[in-house]
Image (spheres, rainbow, N blue to C red):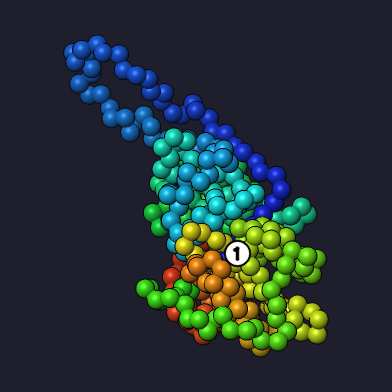
Amino acid sequence: MPSIMYNTGVPHLFHFSQSDRAQFHEPVRLGIAAIPAAYPPRAVYNAAMELHPVPPDIYSTLLPLVPEEPGTLLANALLRTPHAEITVAADDLMYPTALVIEQLPGQAGQAEAHSVTFIGAMDEVTLTAYLRQLEPPAMLYAPAALAAPLLHALHVMRANLVACAFVTFAPPTDTGMNSVFLASPPGGMRRLRAADAHRLTIIPAAFWGAYGTATSALSEGIVYARYLRAEIVSLACVTARTQRYAEIGTFTIERARGNDFARDCVARLIGAVVAEWALLPMLTGAADNEEARSIAHALGLTEEHAWPAYAWTRMRTEA
């Protein structure tokens, strides 16, 4: 199962009222006697954080805030991916310390979810103000420090949540990838090109990750497919690309599962990633997906990194 990532056509921006935030100006030098003895610290006046829409032309400047690690790899890739359908908000456009990166829902007519990643420290008031701009379903990613205020804000909003556990499989630390992945592919498999997009209509929109669509994934990424009687039955593709890593997702139609088709696709894809991009591969799936674990371990991706997410499915109705 690939990381859950989504795409749409029209971004929405949002605005938060400034009425709850004190405005600070350059102090007037009145002499020390004019300063009250019990003057409250600045933090008291700046308790309510504001989030401001970030212009796309400065997305790349935010990359140092978004680590290349499981859980935030998608967000990092979205900031790098040309034409990604996202909105980004920051607490300060000049010196940001907190971000929200949202990849918007799927194609028109599809009930796809928002993918929202929270970075940095935010108070519950700020989180609640942002969440009220969203319509479920949404998949929410947050660091451990933000989990408690995020969950409490959603509880107050009566959001119906499902806790999700993911695991990312990577090569063992300080080891390279074996050249066996560069061997010729087995029969019935080939690399797909942009002209093959029409063959992929059965693939869920969420599969394409940071690329958003099959067309973008084929033209900007790498995709391998396994054929069976002229039908595509299994795929492996890069779903997110950062400076150091290529995250891989797999999809196999139900009736073709259990035949190692996905493993063969992933093996060939890893070979291409290493040879062409010199990146380390990562395979992400649900923590209870034993097939993904079996594929990863068989291909040398034995280092596991678990991370949580929260599926916001709908608003609860009043009892």
Is 305 drawn above or below residue 318 in the view shown?
Answer: below
- What residue is shown at x 76% (from left), y 84% (from top)? 228
Q: Position of residue 223 (x, y in %)?
A: 66, 70
Residue 304 appearing in the image = yes
- Which secondary structure lies at badge 1? strand
Image label count: 1
Instruction: Pick the quarter of the image with the N terminus.
Output: bottom right
Q: Residue furthest top?
A: 30
Circle 1 crowding by C-alpha within 10 Å: few under 14, some 14–19, many from 20? many
Is residue 137 something that shows in the picture? no
295 vs 243, nearest the viewer: 243
> Who's the residue at 22% across and 24% down the image?
38
Residue at image x 37%, y 20%? 25
Question: Horizontally, is 114 left or right of 156 in the view?
Answer: right
The residue identified by callout 1 is 239
In the image, is residue 199 above or below residue 253? above
Q: Is residue 150 left or right of residue 45?
A: right
- For the point 52% across and 36% down, the residue is 52
Quadrant occupied by the C terminus:
bottom right
Residue 274: where, in percent of width, then height? 52, 72
Q: Nearer the viewer, residue 20 or 276?
A: 276
Residue 41 image-quadrant placement: top left
Would residue 116 be found to the left or right of residue 33 on screen?
A: right
Q: Position of residue 111 (x, y in %)?
A: 72, 57
Instruction: Give the image quarter of residue 316.
Output: bottom right
Please name the amino acid that badge 1 sits on. Answer: Thr
Q: Is residue 21 above or below residue 137?
A: above
Residue 65 location, x and y as percent? 43, 49
Front residue (pair 156, 136):
136
